[in-house]
Image: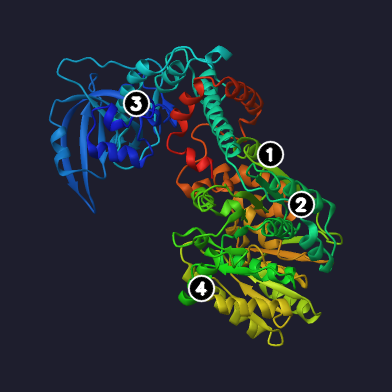
Amino acid sequence: MNGATPLSEALSISDKAAANFAKAGVETLAHAWFYLPRRYENRAQITPISGFSDGATVQTVAQVVNAEVIARRKRMLVVTLRDEAGALCRLRFFRFYPNQLRQFSEGRRGIFYGKAVASDYGYELHHPEIQWLAEGEQPVLPEGYTPIYPTIKGISQKQWRNLIDKALTLAEQCLPRKDALSEQGLPDLLSALTALHQPDVTMTLADLSDPRHPAHKRLITEELCAHRLSVLHARAQLRSKVAAKLPADDRLQNTLLEQLPFKMTSAQQRVSAEIAADLARDVPMMRLVQGDVGSGKTLVALLACLQCVTAGYQAVLMAPTELLAEQHATNLTRLLGDLPISVGLLVSKTPAAEKKARLAAIANGELQIIVGTHALFQQQVSYHALGLLVIDEQHRFGVHQRLALQQKSHEQHAAHQLVLTATPIPRTLAMSQYGELDVSVIDALPTGRKPITTAVISNTKRSDVIARVGAVCREGQQAYWVCPLIEESEVIECENAEATAAQLQAELPDIRVALLHGRMNSQQRQEVMADFVAGNVQLLVATTVIEVGVDVGNATLMIIENAERFGLAQLHQLRGRVGRSDLASFCLLMYQAPLGEIAKRRLNIMRESNDGFVIAEEDLNIRGAGELLGVRQTGDALFRIADLERDQDLLPSVHRLCDSWQQTQHPIINELLNRWLSGREQYLRA
């Protein structure tokens, strides 16, 4: 028996109880051990009814005088209690089961815990927690604080405490009292768990909430070590595979660069050289390229694809949305010009006959660069010789999707993998979660680009904003108007965009307005974008489908309506659709008052900074690591106990420990991986 043992196997619990605990994410012994209390309560004292005060949390011993169901507007169960001094109070249940009335037989004694509420009838306890006492039984009070666990419907605090107490009893049998972490001066794991689940009288509330208390520090360090070890394990596995050598051949690349109307930045040249060196080796490349919006990641990726194709292999570029995939396919074809390279698009909405022909061309190697969405790793897709995976906007994919695409590579060779992101990964996250990747940063924008000026403006000034849009378009430039994000319904969001486009066209009759949203078919979207790129459309009204990939240098004004509904990363991406030439560009963030604190903080950050790394750090603080990395899409939170931002000072020592364990193949490695990451290892290898 160990931490990975299922609860139903380790403990005598019913299938129904096991299913309830599973809904709360507790399925194994280790899950129970690490399911920490949300807070603690002092249940070591008894308060007589005469000592109650309004709003105070109290615990009293009393007996039932009577119980009755009162029929008012809604039926309620009301119970009268008397304590040993003869003082009375009432229990009130606004929701109850019919057979609950039977519990409150006259004279029955119990311990009642809840919040005292002053009423016209004296003090009441609403829905208290009850521990019944047998006749003549004296109450036994806990020493120290009582843990209160986060819970879901169907599981009481008593059930949580019983489950975790049983799990801790089994922990005594399978957790060592001494290990490599206790040798570092930390408590052993069982002592740390016991201290937090069953705190004794020596611990204070301050101790129990302090992440640097030895008990907390042991668990945090252990979890960080488990994740670091999984990263090292992933790196070792990747490095043990053999990839096809894709030697550098500059002929096609030089032809491409010569026909471009601009020169690569030194940052692009540096990153391209790093990628070229990786591809030429027989060790699978795993490189993360971070580059702010508009820094030129697409060109760097295309040069890598050319190196792959020149060596006789296929390259795949996977994008998170159909619009972005279409834009990539269009841009790559435009950049390649007359070069003899075939580019194909594969998305789920590709017409059946067209898809059949395209799948055949992929399988026989006729298509050399394949651009698409998640359709690229569907079962019917078979690659002739897949050499390179380029994954754009990696945080938008669930990690299992990246894993599925990697499994499409050639039987004898692992594919090289290039991961692109315009949402910079903060240093803390990169250290902990992307340790298996080599990281390159395109840290310069093309020459001549000007910072985008951002303003925050109330939507009460909407008419002024519309006038500004009209003026910009009449000067020969173009603008975007992004409609509010309505998470509950894509249909409503698109209807809203249609209404906005109609209103703007009515108010700006001399401006050519077009509409773009995700429910349009591929041909409609491509036609609208082609018109916008050609300048035939001056104002593009859109939903967030334009968040990434759209590149029109003449567009200099971005309006984001109800900007308070968007996250920081999304606002930064949307803003990045302008400022893509040497023209001065502007972004207006319109908001609906009143603003909440988090929304106010987001908009202020956007107004103050154009730096994607600064914005990503703030996004980490606001949203948390899981959303930023995309791991929430797998159903797994990134960390249960550790917090990367709070605990980053522990990372250097964690890395030193793990690196030394890895070198000596210390037995604690398997213990930690089984305890913390059992069943999730494949995600970390994606």
The foreground one among 217 and 454 is: 217
**Mark found first going from the N terminus, 3 or 1:** 3
Residue 266 shown left or right of residue 509 in the figure = right
Residue type indicated by callout 1: Arg
Mark 1 and mark 2: Cα distance apart in space: 22 Å
Residue 140, position as x, y percentages in the image: 28, 15
Residue placed at 32% from the left, 43% from the top?
153
Residue 164's label in the rendered image is 3
Amino acid at circle 3: Ile
> Would you name the residue on which mark 1 appears?
427
As measured in the structure, the alpha-carbon distance from the residue carrying label 4 to the one carrying label 3 is 58 Å
Residue 281 is situated, as x and y percent measured from the top left of the image, at: 69, 44
* Placement of 367 over or under 132, stated as above or below: below
Badge 3 density bin: few <14, some 14–19, many ≥20, Cα 10 Å: many
Tag nearer the camera, 4 or 3? 4
Type of amino acid at the residue the image marks with label 4: Ala
Residue that badge 4 annotates: 357
Few, some or many residues within 10 Å of mark 4 (<14, 14–19, 20+): few
Question: Which sits earlier in the primary sequence, circle 2 or circle 3?
Answer: 3
Frontmost of labels 1 and 4 is 4
Q: In front here: 290 or 136?
A: 290
Exactly how many numbered labels are in the figure?
4
The reply to whether dot 4 and dot 2 touch (C-beta < 8 Å) is: no
Which residue corresponds to mark 2? Answer: 272
Using the image as rendered, state which of residue 52 and residue 315 is in the foreground: 315
Residue type marked 2: Ser
Earlier sequence position, callout 1 versus callout 2: 2
